């Protein structure tokens, strides 16, 4: 039986790729009600995302630039959904 590695879906922007890496590593998740990305504040998940970005950057992007974009996206995401009034999100 031929085994193939599952490919990630094609991305349109480096930011979109970084968001996908952060979600895959468990560093961010979506507000179930509004869809905003939220930081999970998990240092191990952040480390996994940075490691993954450096090891498997998108085609044409250097590992350093991929890691920098992951940090840039992570720094732009808060731990609360801006639309949620209470802390239930």
Image (spheres, rainbow, N blue to C red):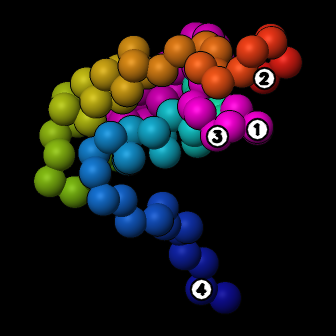
Residue that appears at 49% across and 45% down: 20
**Residue position marked by numbered label 4 in the rendering:** 2
Q: How far is the residue under mark 1 from the one under mark 4?
A: 37 Å
Q: How far is the residue under mark 4 from the one under mark 3?
A: 37 Å
**Residue position marked by numbered label 3 in the rendering:** 35
Is residue 1 shown to the viewer in this render? yes
**Residue position marked by numbered label 1 in the rendering:** 32
Q: How far is the residue under mark 2 from the one under mark 4?
A: 43 Å
Task: Identify the image quadrant of residue 36.
Answer: top right
Instruction: Say what secondary structure mark 4 lies in.
Output: loop
Which quarter of the rendered picture does the N terminus lie within?
bottom right
Residue that appears at 39% across and 19% down: 76
Is the residue marked by circle 3 packed among few (<14), some (14-19), or many (20+) residues within 10 Å? few
Report the magenta residues as a range. 31-54
Q: How far is the residue under mark 2 from the one under mark 1?
A: 7 Å
Q: Is residue 15 above or below residue 77?
A: below
Which quarter of the rendered picture does the C terminus lie within?
top right
Q: Is residue 77 left or right of residue 38?
A: left
Q: Is residue 2 left or right of residue 63?
A: right
**Image spot of residue 7 (x, y percent):** 48, 66
Task: Identify the image quadrant of residue 10.
Answer: bottom left
Quick check: marks 2 and 1 in contact, CB under 8 Å? yes
Q: Is residue 17 above or below residue 39?
A: below
Q: Is residue 81 above or below residue 1?
A: above
Is the residue marked by circle 1 packed among few (<14), some (14-19), or many (20+) residues within 10 Å? few
Is the residue marked by circle 2 packed among few (<14), some (14-19), or many (20+) residues within 10 Å? some
**Residue position marked by numbered label 2 in the rendering:** 89
- Disc with the residue nearer the chain's start (2 vs 1): 1
Instruction: Say what secondary structure mark 3 lies in.
Output: loop
- Disc with the residue nearer the chain's start (4 vs 3): 4
């Amino acid at each position: 039986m031929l085994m193939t590695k599952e490919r990630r879906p094609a991305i349109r922007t480096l930011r979109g790729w970084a968001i996908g890496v952060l979600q895959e590593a468990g560093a961010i998740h979506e507000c179930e009600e509004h869809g905003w990305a939220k930081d999970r504040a998990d240092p191990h998940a952040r480390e996994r995302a940075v490691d993954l970005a450096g090891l498997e950057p998108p085609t044409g992007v250097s590992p350093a630039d991929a890691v920098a974009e992951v940090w840039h996206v992570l720094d732009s995401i808060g731990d609360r959904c801006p639309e949620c009034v209470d802390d239930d999100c």
